Image (cartoon, rainbow, N blue to C red):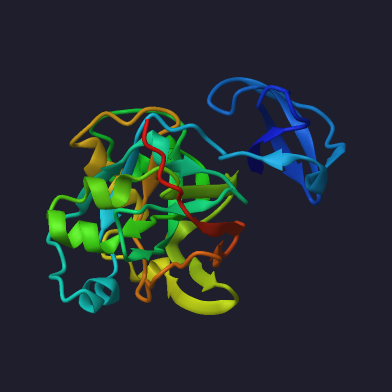
Amino acid sequence: MRIVRYLKRRGAKPAWGWVSEDRVGRLDGSPFGPYGRKEAKDHLERIRLLPPVEPGKIICVGRNYAAHAAEHDAQVPELPLLFLKPPSSVIGPGEPILLPPQSENVEHEAELALVIGRGGRWIRPEKAAEHILGFTAANDVTARDLQRRDGQWTRGKGFDTFCPIGPWIETDLDPADVLITCYVSGQMRQMGSTRDMLFPVLTLVAFISSVMTLNAGDVILTGTPAGVGPLRDGDEVTVEVEGIGELTNPVRSEKRQVE
């Protein structure tokens, strides 16, 4: 099932929904608890898709593909390399990625993301699938110059709009061999498969839960394949994940506003 958050009209409250072909039906309740499905009547093109979840935290995995580590002359990590993005970085389909004035080199990173459905700590790998609600597409937008300058990754990864996710949560997906592709203004930049992950999805859930409690709604970005590259004002970037769909966002320069 494909789960969405959406607005039916301006001024309406965000609602949970489910997708059937090109139509959306409302969910009574939350996908993190009991819910019922109403008939899918609303056309997708007549609603506004929101980020499919409002995460309490976003845990990201760095250098989870050997080829991506190599393109930055970085060593392959012995254990999953973790960092966080703030919830304020999340945007949904169609919302603009804003290039901050502090950076001269912002890059895309197409990724498979997972959404935790049932929280836990010290989750065993063989039980990890029971804690996953589903999967979505993500773009780990990165100010590469700031990331390199700081050493710590918080600033380079944490700007507002630097975590597009969507368009929905797909609950029926085998993440073992999923193709991830990224296009910028129609030009293919990235193509890779999750089969090349150094640490697969279930291993990541288990490892992360040995560090911190995972809560329902938390999002894990599982790493990006090789081919990351720059984003410019006026670009349009599309992350396509096999079995899920496309996440497209325009790119705009942020106007500096000082209060």
User: For the point 25% across and 73% down, which residue is it?
Assistant: 66
Name which quarter of the figure residue 72 lies in.
bottom left
In percent of width and height, residue 98 lies at: 46, 52
Name which residue lies at 32% across and 28% down. Answer: 120
Left or right, 18 with respect to 46, comes to left
Q: Quadrant of the C terminus?
A: top left
Residue 137 visible in the snapshot: no
Residue 48 position by quadrant: top right
Q: Nearer the viewer, residue 214 or 236?
A: 236
Q: Please report the residue visible at 55 percent of the width from the left and 79 percent of the height from the top.
A: 187
At which x and y percent is residue 2?
65, 44
Q: Position of residue 196 (x, y in %)?
A: 34, 71
User: Does the rendering let one see residue 169?
Assistant: yes
Answer with left or right where residue 33 lies relative to residue 229: right
Label count reads: 0
Give the camera-side residue of 186 and 200: 186
Residue 69 pos. (x, y %): 22, 71
**In the figure, 17 relative to 72: above or below?**
above
